[in-house]
Image: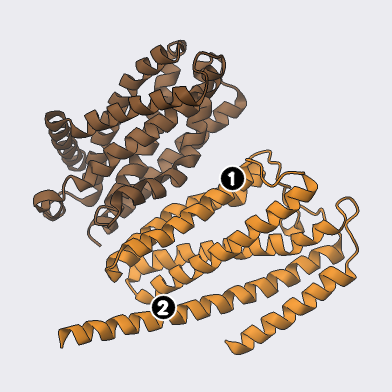
Amino acid sequence: MIGLCVIAAALLARNLNVILLHLPDEASQGAIYRIFYFHLPAAMTAGACAFVALAASILYLATKNFRYDSIAVSVTEVGLAFGAMVLATGMIWARIIWGIWWTWDARLTSMLIVWLMYAGYLMLRRAIDEPTARARNAAVLSIFIAPGVYITWKSIEWWRTQHPGPVLSIRGGGGMAPGMESAAYWNLLALGLIAVVLVMVRMQQETYQRRLDALRREAHVL
Amino acid sequence: MIFLRQSLTIAVKDLRAELRSKEAINASLSFAIVILLLFSFAFDPSSEQTREISGGLLWLVFAFAGALVLNRSFARELTNDCLEALIASPVSGAALFLGKALSNFLVLIAIELLSLPVFGIFYNVRWTGQFWTLMMILLLATWGLTVIGTVFSALTVNLRLRELMLPTLVYPILIPALLPAIQLTSAVIAGQPLTADLYAGLRLLIAFNIIFTALALGLVETILVG
């Protein structure tokens, strides 16, 4: 885990060097476009977290193995952090390019809604004490949130949004110079690794928590 | 067949209990009227604006008033351990859910139909211009509200802060249904024809209903039994 942490930090340092010092300003947007290198990778990381949360929730309901529950809660928390990063970087970019912090277009709105729903997921977990009921109800809620995530992902294709359409060539965008696009993938790798490390830390906490709870129950019986 | 008959039995049971006590209907209808009254202070109710924002106004009222009904849906079975008895009965979780959803749906529709004339009178809006289109939108969006509300009522029934958690969870999930419902209702009350954009909203509403009805029917057994 510490090894991964070091690799992620080194990669992030390398990317910051490339993004801030080596890549030229974008032709029409100027320097602010660089925030894109954090906005899009963070969004993809948050999306991946949502996907893993859905998979772990389904697996928990299928197997009743608490390991999947701790995966689900860990990736949801980390995804929420990366989602906050997406919203914050997007708002800073919008203030410079559009002149406003926020607009109620389909992408921004759906992203905010999904973010709030995952916050509700964590609130629901706090409101239930019994571990089995907590894991079960949280898993069901996570499955109910998943269509919203899909809507958010597809919203830039389904509606005419103020948010830019797809830019990466793998999604049929192709609006970036080759050197600029590869930097986005490098930073996706860095942020993805950071997310993995955070999830691992969080899962370890969950494991300790469960062990503590078990000990407490045992002490209670004695 | 037996599934539908069981659902119907549950629905009739719930409706009978509701009609005898009238606690949810009375509370949520008076709540709806209070909100309608409050909204009239938020802006000048006689202006032309009312017609444009009528959809948003109505659906906020319906969603708020609906939460009161939906909150009670499973919570009313807690006394005397009725919920345990229902779960132990040979009725499947999905049938129990469908029955409760049907009864909630009818109660909500009744509240909406009673609020509409009140809205028309207080805000001086003629809402009957495209009556049947409005009814179709009402039925579709109310079904979405009911399905989500009923399944989350089951999810939150044993929670501390139940009354708080249900709206917090339900409203964000409802937005993909409320948004087209608001736009369609505003357009219909303003007497506009349905444009391509509005048809896209209608499709979103129908897709929302299908996806979440299927999810709810599939998952409610897990919620109730484990």
Above or below — where is A110 with respect to A74?
above
Give, as a three-letter code, the residue at label 2: Glu
Query: Foreground: A214 or A75?
Result: A214
- Quarter occupied by the C terminus of chain B: bottom left
Image vertical order of residue B72 relative to residue A17, above or below: above
* B13 and B24: which is toward the camera: B24
Q: Colour of chain B?
A: brown
Residue B143 shows in the view: no
Judging from the image, mark 2 belongs to the subunit labelled A
**Label 2 Cα crowd, 10 Å radius (few <14 / some 14-19 / many 20+):** some
Residue at position x 88%, y 55% from top?
A30
For numbered disc 2, what is the local secondary structure? helix
The location of residue A46, given as percent across then percent down, is 59, 63
The numbered dot on residue A109 is 1
Among the 4 quarters of the image, the one containing residue A83: bottom right
Q: Would you place residue B100 above or below residue A172 in this image?
A: above
Residue to which mark 2 is pinned: A206
Residue type at numbered disc 1: Thr
> Which residue is found at the position 36% from the left and 17% from the top?
B118
The label number, if any, that marks residue A164 in the structure image = none
Residue A218: x percent and y percent? 21, 86
Classify residue A122 by image quadrant.
bottom left
Asked if residue A194 shows in the view, the reply is yes
- Which quadrant would the N terminus of chain B be assigned to in this image? top left
Mark 1 Cα within 10 Å, few/some/many (few <14, many 20+)?
some
Relative to the observer, which residue lies in front, A170 or A66? A66
